[in-house]
Amino acid sequence: MWIWHAFFGSVGSLNVINVLNMSPLLDDMYNGTAPNFSFQVAGTSYRNRYYLVDRIYPELACFVKSLSCPNDRKRLKFKSAQERTRKEVEHVGLGV
């Protein structure tokens, strides 16, 4: 697993949304200077970066939230893999 961006404030002083607002992570997308980040998955081309997030994040096209009620095996597998990966990244940030 690769972590391409990390931003840490003072411990306990910032919630997730405040950290996101202070982080330069999305600045290049907002100001139109984002580098080309094309990739292909199962024959489908994508041109933007995507970030795994939970439900408290705002509705942005680059944020992929977990499915609240997966109704088939494929979606259940996606939800499980996404939540597992997101927890791994959170543990890195906590030093666990």
Image (tube, rainbow, N blue to C red):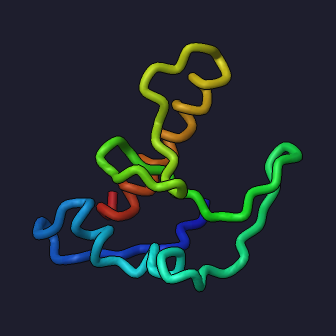
Answer left or right for 73 relative to 94. right
Instruction: Residue at 46%, 42% (x, y): give it.
Output: 65
- Residue 55 found in image quarter: top left
Q: Nearer the viewer, residue 7 or 39?
A: 39
Q: What is the number of callouts on the image? A: 0
Q: Nearer the viewer, residue 27 or 95?
A: 27
Instruction: Residue at 61%, 25% (x, y): give it.
Output: 75
Position of 65 relative to 60 (above/below) = above
Instruction: Residue at 29%, 46% (x, y): give it.
Output: 56
Q: Residue lying farthest left? A: 13
Q: Quadrant of the N terminus?
A: bottom right
Q: Quadrant of the C terminus?
A: bottom left
Residue 51 in the image: x percent, y percent? Answer: 52, 57
Answer left or right for 72 relative to 89. right
Residue 66 in the image: x percent, y percent? Answer: 47, 36
Residue 76 in the image: x percent, y percent? Answer: 57, 22
- Residue 10 found in image quarter: bottom left
Instruction: Residue at 48%, 76% (x, y): give it.
Output: 30
Position of 34 relative to 73 (above/below) = below
Q: Nearer the viewer, residue 8 or 51?
A: 51
Residue 6 in the image: x percent, y percent? Answer: 41, 74
Answer left or right for 7 relative to 66. left
Position of 33 relative to 90 (above/below) = below
